[in-house]
Image: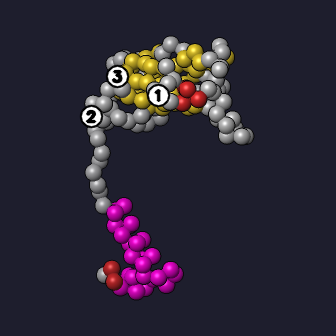
């Protein structure tokens, strides 16, 4: 069956057709489902730079406790007022309980350059951290400073 399908392919040769058939077979097969989802809890916060809201920034929460399934990243995008709601598996579903290092990144829309000091882009140097509890979490504002 596969060999007859390969012979019928005219555009790009047998190798391309074989590759496409393999890819279709892989996609069609069920597969491992990955690590189990951890329960998530609502997380909301605010990002300020020199006491001004930071809009359109990416907030990433890096888990510090590496238990099974804890290596998944939680993230959010700030609105124009600097407010954010965290997502992990689905939009705005929150984050698993635990301790996190936090990074905040923002690029200039036109030039693509980082707007925030580079230390905030690295979980080891950002100085930002949170603990998510098994309840709704309203975080203290992240008070970032210009260099």
Magenta run includes residue 5 = yes
- Residue sitting at 66 percent across and 15 percent down? 50
The answer to whether the residues at label 2 and label 1 have Cβ atoms under 8 Å apart is no
Residue 15 placement (x, y as % from top left) = 42, 78
Task: Classify 74 as above or below 33.
Answer: above
Are there few (<14), some (14-19), or many (20+) residues within 10 Å of tag 1? many
Residue at the right extreme?
A: 110
Quadrant of res 49:
top right
Label 1 sits on residue: 123
Residue for badge 2: 68
Q: Which residues are magenta?
A: 4-28
Distance from Cα at disc 2 to Cα at disc 1: 20 Å
SS of the residue at dot 3? strand
Total marks shown come to 3
Name which quarter of the figure residue 94 lies in. Answer: top left
Instruction: Kindly state the secondary structure of the residue where label 1 is placed.
Output: loop
């Amino acid at each position: 069956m596969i060999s007859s399908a390969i012979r019928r392919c005219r555009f790009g040769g047998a190798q391309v057709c074989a590759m496409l058939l393999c890819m279709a077979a892989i996609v069609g097969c069920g597969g491992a489902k990955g690590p189990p989802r951890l329960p998530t809890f609502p997380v909301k916060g605010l990002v300020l730079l020199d006491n001004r809201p930071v809009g359109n920034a990416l907030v990433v929460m890096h888990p510090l406790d590496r238990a099974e399934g804890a290596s998944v990243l939680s993230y959010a995008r700030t609105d124009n007022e600097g407010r954010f709601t965290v997502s992990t598996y689905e939009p705005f579903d929150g984050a698993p309980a635990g301790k996190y290092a936090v990074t905040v990144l923002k690029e200039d829309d036109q030039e693509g350059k980082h707007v925030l000091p580079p230390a905030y882009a690295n979980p080891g140097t950002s100085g930002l951290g949170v603990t998510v509890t098994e309840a709704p979490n309203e975080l203290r504002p992240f008070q970032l400073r210009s260099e």
